[in-house]
Amino acid sequence: MSETYQVAVLAGDGIGPEVMAEARRVLDAVTRKFSLSINYTECRVGGIAIDVDGRALPEATLKACEAADAILFGSVGGPKWESLPANEQPERAALLPLRKHFALFANLRPGVCLPELVHASPLHPATVAGGFDVLCVRELTGGLYFGEPKYTKQEGGEYFAVDTMIYWESEIRRIARVAFEAARQRSGRLTSIDKANVLQNGLLWRRIVTETAADYPDITLNHLYVDNAAMQLVKNPKQFDVILAENMFGDILSDELAMLTGSLGMLPSASLGEATGTGAVAGARRFGMYEPSGGTAPDIAGKGIANPIAQILSAGMLLRYSLGQDAAADAIDAAVRKVIADGLRTADIWTEGTTRADTATMGSAIAAAI
Ligand code: IPM
Ligand code: MG
């Protein structure tokens, strides 16, 4: 009997539970096809956990995640919890602590614009003709998000706030390696983002990434300042293959990239820890948390119309990176592409001449295509 994998399922708030149900449906289809055995533990997180357990990340949820091979995450937050003190809000009190607790330093955000969905991109059709495929590798546990000191104080009748941007060279080196390895699996081009013309952090970032490049002579590396990168992305996203950025720059650029592909509802993500076994991204299993890029979408939550594809592709990334089940992951990617090619569309990507589908119809069709 092969291994039984343990997956913690944290659907969260808003559209989270709706799209998670479809991801589970698709996972059931691949586990049947590939004779896998996965045990799911469903846990509360975010606003729903605040309501029921009194905190966004209950102890029981954290324990279940610690016992798991991976976390499949939906989304957290919503208007109901926005007036809570900042430190109790779902994002600050659940998402960021999960990233830090499990040292999920490597955030992979694939920005894929499928040829069939070029019309959904806000860019000129000629700019995105044929679609594009850019992978954003974002450092996730350092920089301004977590640097200390971090506080707000009052002095002379005026408030001031301090956040600290700090990177150790070991933090830069380990995320750089992930990006170089990813580039090696793709077209071999890596663009590193920094603000070396202003920040000390930028100078160190550029130096360490350049040093790391010596171990990857097959990869073509270039550097861009973050402002220029933001501009180049809208000018011509096809010039990029893999983008490497620190936490805050990666946060910003990955939202930009997501929008350029046409719909946030299509983009999965993986937040990975250190590999168990050998250090490469491919072929090594890592603990990870997998979530769609789109958030809770409170405006459409409960209507059954959300696009479940980002959650479904996130489940695929979980199979690939945390369970080492590449064939099952490939099957999910292929099923999504097939259903899109067949003309099925949720509202966010619908155009004249294609078939409108609700959340459950899209999930069932993808499951059936496995
Ligand atoms: C993301 C989100 C989070 C971040 C927020 C919700 C804290 O924007 O995952 O990109 O800034 O990392
Ligand atoms: Mg963000």
Image (cartoon, helix red, strand yellow):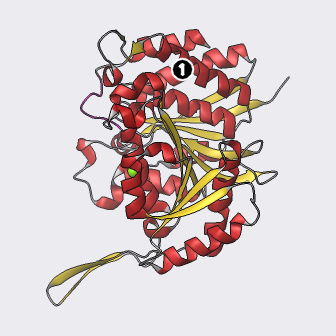
Write the residue at 77% across / 54% down.
279
**x and y percent of residue 79 in the render?**
23, 43
Q: Amino acid at mark 1?
A: Arg
Report the magenta residues as a range. Answer: 296-302
Tell me the chief SS of the magenta region.
loop
Q: Nearer the viewer, residue 213 or 99?
A: 213
**x and y percent of residue 162 in the render?**
34, 78
Write the residue at 33% across / 18% down.
350
Q: Nearer the viewer, residue 332 or 179?
A: 179
Q: What residue is pinned by disc 1?
A: 337
**Quadrant position of the C terminus in the picture:** top right
* Residue 300 is covered by the magenta coloring: yes
* Residue 353 is covered by the magenta coloring: no
Q: What kind of element bears circle 1?
A: helix
> Looking at the image, is 266 positioned above or below residue 233?
above
Write the residue at 66% across / 26% down.
330
> Looking at the image, is 268 positioned above or below residue 201?
above
**x and y percent of residue 70 in the render?**
63, 40
Res. 138 in view: no
Q: For the view shown, which residue lies furthest in the left direction?
A: 157
**Mark 1 Cβ inside 8 Å of ligand 1:** no
How many numbered marks are there?
A: 1
Q: Nearer the viewer, residue 15 or 109?
A: 109
